[in-house]
Image (tube, rainbow, N blue to C red):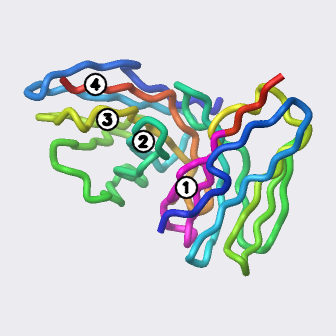
Amino acid sequence: DTEVTQTPKHLVMGMTNKKSLKCEQHMGHRAMYWYKQKAKKPPELMFVYSYEKLSINESVPSRFSPECPNSSLLNLHLHALQPEDSALYLCASSQGGLAGVDTQYFGPGTRLTVL
Amino acid sequence: QQPVQSPQAVILREGEDAVINCSSSKALYSVHWYRQKHGEAPVFLMILLKGGEQKGHEKISASFNEKKQQSSLYLTASQLSYSGTYFCGTATGGNTPLVFGKGTRLSVIA
């Protein structure tokens, strides 16, 4: 099973709302990632968790707050977002360490619209 | 450093071949190729590690020239299902994250 699931599929939120994105994998992978993808652009790395610890934060604004409650789950908490944060948010996982060697498996994404 | 992909876009008729290139200004440890269809997640195609190897599965293969810091993806006898945007992701070390190129939009028409 090479499936990464993400909920919700779509999310519309106002600039004052607080919401969370959820990602789950049951492949026993030890690294999980959040990417942001704007239309017609490549995925941009936001955060990496390796063995449930935050190992990379690509200078992401504090209105995005990641959380890894256990090795199968990854959340992205959203607060006071801006309209320019509207994008497809992709979660990915890989077997171990970071992605230099391991294959990353992507979830279907959450399409976020900030009004 | 973001790798450079070429061409930006290509249109093929079914059965034609295509080559997509990915080059970097930095020494590479690995190159990963993905295909993304509109509105869907990127799907892994293959990974090439430094050592100058060539890989393939079915009619899609790739090469990695470590000295030239570039990789090429070869699509032969293209099918309609090959349409999508192809991204290369490069890593400069075994423990460094991927950086994706801007993508190559491939359209296969009947």
Q: Do tags 2 and 4 sit on the same chain?
A: yes
Residue B29 forms part of the magenta stretch = no
Q: What stretch is highlighted in magenta?
A: B87-105
Residue B89 forms part of the magenta stretch = yes
Q: Is mark 4 on a helix, strand or loop?
A: strand
N-term-proximal mark, 2 vs 4: 2
Q: Do tags 1 and 3 sit on the same chain?
A: no
Depth check, mark 1 against mark 2: the one in front is 1
Q: Do tags 1 and 2 sit on the same chain?
A: no
Picture residue at 65% right of the left edge, 29% below the top:
A1
Q: Which mark is drawn over residue A113?
A: 4
The amino acid type, in three-letter code, at marker 1 is: Gly
Height in image: A96 above or below B104?
A: below
| Residue position marked by numbered label 1 in the rendering | B101
* A26 left or right, relative to B70: left
Real-space Cα separation, disc 1 to disc 3, in angstroms:
26 Å
| Residue position marked by numbered label 2 in the rendering | A71
Real-space Cα separation, disc 1 to disc 2, in angstroms:
29 Å
Q: Is mark 1 on a helix, strand or loop?
A: loop
| Residue position marked by numbered label 3 in the rendering | A75
Depth check, mark 2 against mark 4: the one in front is 4
